[in-house]
């Protein structure tokens, strides 16, 4: 007798997917455009342009551990509404702020609201997914982030090149406004609020210790992913395939979309090891192809392998982090996961930049594989023993 599956794509889930998608479109759009804005319009150095990304990540990392407590005290939906509004205000302010120092302050403040808003949306999404289908559901939700990797830079750079930076800033603000409105469609009766607060701040109010092992492994994946997020455009320019960078991310996204239904189902039915291990291997193959890339075909093929690996591994680790604890602690587990993930991105961007300067970009991508090998070993030795399929 066939068992009816509980639906994933509910009204609340679609609303949260849309909201998260719009948040990350702004994030990735600004990541791609602001360095050019700093150098071309504000006449700043490349190092100064890099500060715009660094200071954003620093504020996000510092804020992230407190996000779970904030959600617990105020309520997830209220926090999401408030931080989305403030994130929207910050996005609109790019149109008015010209001094570089003011831009740095704006980036720091926006990083705070980005951190809390994405923690809230991720935790609420987990709350709205049937437990029996959490692997598939969080995989679908993560696609809202992964698709923004492609669409955000595409929109921002197209508007910047075809019109102006001002048009780009205003357009991104409007897009975020539309996405924010979608959050209002979350049904009133859905229990997405967290439980009662405690008066004294403790370790448990900052981190979910049960989620730390898998979050640590995810940070190693983020370290490797920083090589793609931060340095792909420079490397592709060096190799003469800069014009194919958007195609790289398009292939990246298409592969994730095509494989997501299968990887999520396998995770739920057979367990994480059947997804994580092949996913990490695929990621390694993609980075190796990128390191030795000497043709457009290999460049795009590497995007396919990296997209397959990243799209399989990151949602799986996020699911494992949330599954490691009780339902009412999902906000803390989500905050813990993204705190370490953002830390991995920040450290990776810095260390890999040093490697690129001294040893070249080919060695940068080869070094990134080492981080994935360590992640694979840690997963096999520890996480597989303590995590069980739902």
Image (cartoon, rainbow, N blue to C red):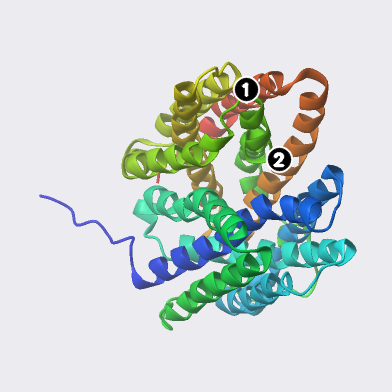
Mark 2–mark 1 CB contact (< 8 Å): no
CA distance separating discs 2 and 1: 14 Å
- Which residue occupies the foreground of this view, 285 or 92? 92
Q: Is residue 354 visible?
A: yes
**Image-based side of 35 in relation to 290, left or right:** right
The disc label shown at residue 126, or none: none
Q: Residue at x 54, y 60 (%)?
A: 122
Residue hosting label 1:
369
Q: Is residue 68 visible?
A: no
Above or below, 373 against 71 in this view is above
Q: Which residue lies furthest to the left in this view?
A: 1
Q: Residue at x 61, y 53 (%)?
A: 28
Above or below, 338 against 348 in this view is below
Q: Residue at x 81, y 54 (%)?
A: 55
Q: Is mark 1 on a helix, strand or loop?
A: helix
- Which residue occupies the foreground of this view, 191 or 11? 11
Residue hosting label 2:
344
Q: How many numbered marks appear?
A: 2
Picture coordinates of residue 217 (x, y %)? 63, 35
Q: Residue furthest bottom?
A: 188
Which corner quadrant of the image does residue 65 belong to? bottom right
Q: What element carries label 2?
A: helix
Q: Residue furthest front?
A: 162
Picture coordinates of residue 240 (x, y %)? 60, 26
Above or below, 353 against 329 in this view is above
Task: Give the crowd class for mark 2: few <14, some 14-19, many >=20 residues within 10 Å.
Answer: many
Which corner quadrant of the image does residue 361 belong to? top right
Picture coordinates of residue 219 (x, y %)? 66, 39
Q: Residue furthest right?
A: 101
Task: Give the crowd class for mark 1: few <14, some 14-19, many >=20 residues within 10 Å.
Answer: many
Q: Which of marks 2 and 1 is nearer the N terminus?
A: 2
């Amino acid at each position: 007798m066939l068992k009816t599956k509980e639906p994933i794509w509910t009204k609340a889930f679609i609303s949260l997917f849309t909201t998260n998608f719009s948040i990350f479109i702004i994030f990735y759009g600004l990541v791609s455009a602001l360095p050019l804005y700093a150098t071309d319009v504000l006449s700043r150095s490349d190092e100064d342009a890099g500060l715009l990304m660094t200071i954003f990540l620093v504020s996000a990392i510092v804020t992230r551990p407190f996000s779970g407590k904030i959600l617990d005290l105020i309520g997830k939906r209220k926090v999401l509404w408030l931080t989305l509004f403030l994130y929207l205000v910050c996005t609109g302010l790019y149109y008015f702020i010209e001094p570089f120092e003011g831009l740095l302050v704006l980036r720091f403040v926006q990083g705070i609201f980005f951190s809390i808003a994405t923690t809230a949306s991720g935790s609420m999404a987990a709350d709205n997914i049937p437990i029996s289908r959490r692997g598939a559901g969080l995989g679908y939700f993560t696609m809202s982030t992964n698709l923004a990797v492609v669409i955000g830079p595409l929109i921002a750079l197209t508007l910047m090149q075809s019109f102006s930076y001002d048009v780009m800033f205003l357009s991104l603000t409007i897009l975020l406004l539309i996405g924010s409105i979608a959050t209002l469609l979350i049904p009133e009766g859905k229990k997405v609020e967290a439980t009662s607060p405690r008066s004294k701040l403790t370790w448990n109010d900052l981190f979910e210790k049960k989620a730390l092992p898998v979050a640590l492994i995810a940070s190693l994946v983020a370290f490797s992913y920083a090589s793609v997020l931060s340095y792909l455009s420079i490397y592709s320019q060096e190799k003469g395939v800069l014009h194919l960078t958007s195609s790289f991310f398009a292939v990246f996204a298409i592969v994730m979309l095509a494989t997501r239904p299968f990887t999520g189902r396998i995770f739920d039915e057979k367990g994480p090891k059947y997804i994580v291990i092949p996913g990490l291997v695929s990621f390694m193959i993609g980075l190796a192809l990128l390191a030795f890339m000497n043709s457009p075909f290999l460049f795009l093929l590497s995007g396919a392998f990296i997209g397959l690996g990243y799209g399989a591994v990151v949602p799986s680790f996020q699911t494992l982090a949330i599954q490691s604890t009780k339902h009412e602690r999902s906000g803390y587990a989500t905050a813990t996961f993204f705190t370490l993930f953002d830390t991995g991105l920040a450290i990776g961007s810095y260390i890999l930049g040093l490697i690129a300067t001294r040893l070249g970009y080919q060695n940068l991508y080869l070094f990134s594989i080492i981080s994935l090998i360590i992640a694979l070993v840690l997963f096999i030795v520890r996480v597989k023993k303590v995590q069980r399929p739902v």
